[in-house]
Amino acid sequence: MGPKLVVVGAGGRMGRRIIAMAAESKHFEIVGAVERAGHPDLGKDIGTLAGIERLNVPLSTSWPAGAQLAVDFSMPEVAEATIKTCVAQGIALVMGTTGLTAAQHEALKAAALKIPIVYSTNMSVGMNVLFNLVGKVAAMLGEDYDIEIVEEHHRFKKDAPSGSALTLAQNICKATSRPYPDSLVHGRSGKEALRKKGEIGMHAIRAGDITGVHSVIYGTLGETITLNHTALSRDTLVRGAIRAAEWLPGKPAALYSMADVLGIK
């Protein structure tokens, strides 16, 4: 049996798929399924909730003793408690929750001095390849190419723009020596909304049940290049999270990215 796994946010859509696919992988011993107080499914077996066989692990507000590894796909307001618990109990952490505040990012960095952490705004393997490419493409194309980022998600997503869209922008800014986040323009409106040289347009769409679409548009006079990643189901994100969870145990304390997990240089 593999490391003893706790899933935080286990009652949500992503959490249930993590439970199901972690059980399917047979690489983990699922010992905990943590949710917020007041969740309507508290006390129910997490295997049943995830649509698989019973695991004899109830959805609970408390962490089990002896956990070795945690995967958190919850809400930003839960993240700080997850980080504190993992540090206190020496639990390795895969953090996939987006919309973290600056203070929470600092808390992750401080925690990574004591425990190994994988953090990514998007755990998809394909999306992390896109993260790696966008800055390189921007640098190769040069200043004559305008850059726009368009992200699309389901109507239930709270944060905007998405964490993945911000990571794309950060990587472009780093590769092209643009100031971040000062180079970002979030949408455009009005009679005087002419594009300024060097800015990066950022646009967020919320509609229906779109899992996740991210497009980076590079345009100049006469041609346009578009790099796009489309997630067809949440399972592509879950597979990446499972891959990170399989990779992390035994690593020294540090803050790792999915690029580390995938060996992307």
Image (cartoon, rainbow, N blue to C red):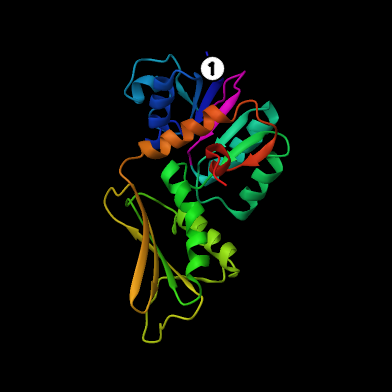
Q: Where is residue 156 in the image (x, y as percent from the top left)?
A: 35, 49
**Residue 62, quarter of the rendered image:** top right
**Would residue 233 be found to the left or right of residue 37 on screen?**
left
Q: Where is residue 211 in the image (x, y as percent from the top left)?
A: 33, 46
Q: In this rendering, is residue 127 above or below 234?
A: below
Q: Position of residue 127 (x, y in %)?
A: 43, 48
Residue nearest the viewer, comparing 260 with 154: 260
**Would residue 167 be found to the left or right of residue 54 on screen?**
right
Chain part drawn in magenta: 62-74
Asked if one can make out residue 44 in the rendered structure from this viewpoint, the answer is no
Q: In this rendering, is residue 86 above or below 149?
A: above
Which secondary structure class fits the magenta region best?
loop
Residue nearest the viewer, comparing 172 with 22: 172
Q: How many marks?
A: 1
Q: Mark 1 points at which residue?
A: 2
- Mark 1 neighbour class, 10 Å CA radius: few under 14, some 14 to 19, many 20 or more: few
**Residue 21, quarter of the rendered image:** top left
